[in-house]
Amino acid sequence: MISYQVHRFGARLARVVQETPRPDGSQVLLRVQAAGVCHTDIHTWQGWYDMGGGKRLTMGDRGVGLPLTLGHEVAGQVAAVGPQAAGAAVGRRCLVYPWIGCGECKVCRRGAEQLCPAPRFLGIFRAGGYSDHVLVPHPRYLIDIGDMPAAQAAPYACSGLTAYSALRKFDPAVLREERVVIFGAGGLGLMAATLLPALDGAGAVVVEPDAARREAALAAGACEAIDPAAPDFMARVRSAAGGSVWAVLDCVGSAQTVQSALDLLTKGGQFVQIGLFGGQIALPTPLLPIRALSYHGSYVGSLEELHALMALVRDRALPPVPTTCRCLAEADAALDDLEHGRVVGRVILQPERPGPEG
């Protein structure tokens, strides 16, 4: 088995050749056909999050240990199953739900494994998909993808699920009647713009500094894409949203985007943040009740939501976000390109000797 691992935070990934594991108990061994490259991979690889004011939240603080194989957006084909892995047939093509909890605490029992205090997320706390094989602890974390290309399916495990779960946190009436302002047209923002029509949303107004990404947002279905560097950008956003901004989805999560979102919202507006770029803001405490604002942090999504999302993708025949497929050996270059803004949509890594899609 060939994997690309973080052995030291911030250093080049190490190419590691080891024996392919054999699944035990309820485990399933998946032959990886596609692994998406996500901004969370950058934070995990670098080893920290920017908390603003010179402060950092390190991956060690979060319980991340090395060596680690990155990759939490994984799709592939079942290669072998453990003796208790009922229903996981060899050859089945699947998307992996990576946000796995302990399975025993009250949070997991409520179906919110992504919020488990003792997480076992693939690609963050356990070996992920920057490899030609990955071990999944139980077949319940596998979602059939039928004949969908693995490179198309993989991003739904994170960027798709995160955008879907966040959009569902808005008032359904607001979603139907008001355009959602989306900060950022990276993988998350493009996915949100694509999903909005399928959720009967009134449309998206995307705020994005990169011209190529603004074009991609319009192609994904956004009503308007606005450059935040424009001198009249706030007025243009309000006008595009219909005069008042009732809903903002921040797929960036910088101090600038959060502050702009709070400044844009009308009284009673909702703000959902999923981006993790970093920074801090000064928030006057009377602001939220006086303006009746809702500030909601949303972290990926549940297994139930991923099943619902994939059913929506199939039933509504949603167009995929733009993807660029690269060899697994180019994982370092893919991370560097994503970090420095040279990616439109999603980069998908594929094993060095990929087999047929099946």
Image: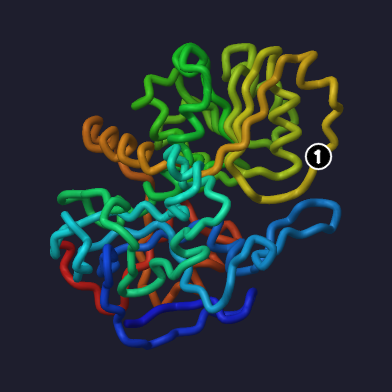
Placement of 258 over or under 155, stated as above or below: above
Query: Percent position (x, y) of residue 219?
Result: 40, 36
Going 50% across and 40% down the picture, which residue do you hit? 189
Going 29% across and 65% down the picture, which residue do you hit? 27
Query: Percent position (x, y) of residue 310?
Result: 29, 40
- The residue pinned by badge 1 equals 281
Query: Percent position (x, y) of residue 277?
Result: 66, 50
Placement of 355 over or under 196, stated as above or below: below
Query: Percent position (x, y) of residue 199?
Result: 38, 24
Q: Is residue 213 visible?
A: no
State the SS at label 1: loop
Q: Residues within 10 Å of mark 1 (few under 14, many from 20)?
A: few
Going 37% across and 62% down the picture, which residue do you hit? 35
Frontmost residue, 321 versus 153: 153
* Residue 246 found in image quarter: top right
243 relative to 202 in the view: left or right: right
